[in-house]
Every structure is written in structure tokens, then in C-alpha cells.
Amino acid sequence: GIDEKTLKRDNVCAASLPTTMGIVAGLLVQNTLKYLLRFGEVTYYLGYNAMKNFFPTLDMKPNPTCSNAACLQRQADYQAWLQKHLAEQADAPAAPTEAPVAAAVDDN
């Protein structure tokens, strides 16, 4: 963990930063679970403006004119992976459709 003594500032409550970090971590875990379970609306950017009590929502997209060589390389790697993945899906036989699974809980 983080030593709270390093967070101490004049006229600032040291407890507010660890609390905020814990809340943001919980939101990230919730978003990850929504993604993994394919449930709900997943946000690809988590931001919070505490002064306005606002959670912005936006899609992050790659920057093709990025000045960082590693960033450009990762973009190229992803595009190569995506092309290979799409080609494999096109070549694969169609999976048989399964009947829907009945609900595990009966309605009362």
C-alpha cells in the first residue's frame, strides 16, 4: 500500500486521496466485470470531475500521428493481429447454434 505520510499536505485531508483511490479502483473492477461477463454498458475511459460531480464518457481511439515510436508499433501490432483474427474467423466453420439455457431461478 501507499504510506499515508507521503500524502500529507498542508490544508489537505490525507484521508481523501486513499478514499478516492479506493472508489476509483472499485469502479474499474466493476467495469472489468461488465466487460468479462458481457453485461451492461462498458466504458473505455473512466474519468471523474469532482468539482462538477461529472463522469465523462468517451471512446479512446489510437492516434496515427503519435510521436511515440512504441505507441505506433503497438498500433501496427494490433492491426496485424486484427487482420489475422478476422481471416481465421472467416475460414472457420460456422458454430452450431445452441438452444437458450433456461433460467436458473423460477419467477414467483
Image: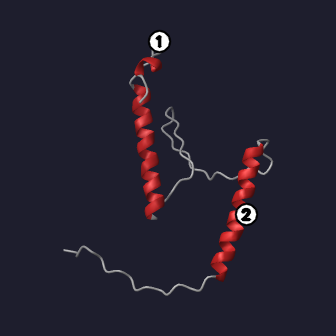
Q: Name the residue rendered at 31%, 80% in the picture.
A: 102
Above or below 9: residue 77: below
- Does residue 39 appear anywhere in the picture? no
- The amino acid beneath tag 1 is Asp
Q: CA distance from mark 2 to mark 1?
A: 51 Å
91 with respect to 25 (left or right): right
21 with respect to 46 (left or right): left
- The amino acid beneath tag 2 is Ala
Label 2's element?
Answer: helix
Above or below 5: residue 33: below
Q: Are marks 2 and 1 in contact (CB under 8 Å)?
A: no
- Does residue 20 appear anywhere in the picture? yes
Foreground label between 2 and 1: 2
Q: Position of residue 24 (x, y in %)?
A: 45, 40
Q: Nearer the viewer, residue 45 or 98?
A: 98
Location of the C terminus by quadrant is bottom left
Q: Which residue is mark 2?
A: 80
Q: Position of residue 47 (x, y in %)?
A: 54, 42
**Residue 10 tag number:** 1
Q: Based on the displayed image, in which of its 4 quarters is residue 76 positioned? A: bottom right
Location of the N terminus by quadrant is top left
Lower sequence index among marks 2 and 1: 1
**Residue 43 tag number:** none
Above or below 34: residue 63: above
Q: Name the residue rendered at 68%, 53% in the picture.
A: 61
Label 1's element?
Answer: loop
59 with respect to 17 (left or right): right
Q: Based on the displayed image, in which of its 4 quarters is residue 80 positioned? A: bottom right
